[in-house]
Amino acid sequence: MKNKTNKGTVDTAPETAPAVSEEKKEDQPKNNSREKIAGTKGEALIIVNDLFKSFGDHKVLRGITTEIDKGEVVAIIGPSGCGKSTFLRSLNLLEVPDSGTIRFEGTDITDKSVDINKMREKMGMVFQQFNLFRNLTIKQNIMLAPTKLGKMTKEQASARADELLKRIGLSDKANAYPGSLSGGQQQRVAIIRALAMNPDVMLFDEPTSALDPEMVGEVLSLMKELADTGMTMVIVTHEMGFAREVADRVLFIIEGVIAEENTPDEFFANPVNPRLKDFLSKVL
Ligand SMILES: Nc1ncnc2c1ncn2[C@@H]1O[C@H](COP(=O)(O)OP(=O)(O)O)[C@@H](O)[C@H]1O
Ligand SMILES: [Mg+2]
């Protein structure tokens, strides 16, 4: 189970990957002895196979293969522009890959006959910029998707919103508008808004990057709490301490491939790829 070939990674680069310059090959680990980690919890929720995506002639994803298990927390790190957001957004088809497959709960969501909106209902997404509806109250924001998509009656959605707001200590903000909340509060609301749909996985794209430093902690604590409940989470982040503490596995993406992946302890203590070593020396 743990020893699957992970052909999207650099050191076992697929033949279909674009030619890498000699110089870049030099950067890659010389041995393939490191065991590939397919998922750390045993039961796959998302299986990504050989994902490619270009924008024009810019090849952004160049063969990403990985598995995300039920209950697993996967942190994704890498330099700006390496394809982290594109990869994350591909997981719920906000970006449509050029080739490769994504199986979510057994269904290949890249198959054109799949009702992607149904699939997306099970995949919560949290963005850097919160993306709350400014003209709706906090409670209306939380109730919107479950009621609009017919998942809950108004009463059910209202009860769920109350419960979630209580959980994050923002019951008194139910009727406030997003603009009157701090960034940290807005992002916590964005997280519970996604949770209101009872998703099977939560995707986070740099959820704390737009926050003032003093508000990062409250958002990370909520995410940690969520991880502790067993939620499957895929998190693009620059918060290395958080990745180390909360993730089951950390992926390093560079130039559209997974150049290294490991359990957080190994990943941070014994990085192998020179690009990762260099990256960590700059961010740690
Ligand atoms: N919709 C798009 N159209 C054209 N280029 C894009 C688009 N989205 C992303 N890119 C480019 O793809 C590359 C990877 O972007 P992204 O996945 O956002 O990187 P990251 O999240 O790692 O910073 C960047 O060079 C970016 O400019
Ligand atoms: Mg990004």
Image: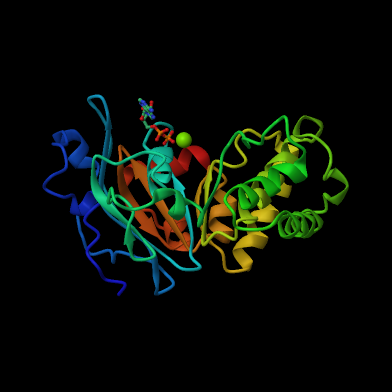
Task: For ligand 1, give the image quadrant.
Answer: top left
* Residue depicted at 71% across the width and 56% down the height: 157
* Residue depicted at 83% across the width and 37% down the height: 176
* Residue 171 image offset from top left, x and y in percent: 85, 51
* Residue 269 image offset from top left, x and y in percent: 45, 57
Of 259 and 45, which appears nearest the observer?
A: 45
Residue 9, can we see it?
A: no
Which of the 4 image quarters holds residue 106? bottom left
Which of the 4 image quarters holds residue 95? top left
Of 242 and 136, which appears nearest the observer?
A: 136
* Residue depicted at 54% across the width and 57% down the height: 244
* Residue depicted at 26% across the width and 71% down the height: 3
Instruction: Give the farthest residue toward the left.
Output: 15
* Residue 217 image offset from top left, x and y in percent: 71, 47
Which image quarter holds the N terminus? bottom left
In the picture, measured across the screen, residue 24 lies left or right of residue 284, that is left
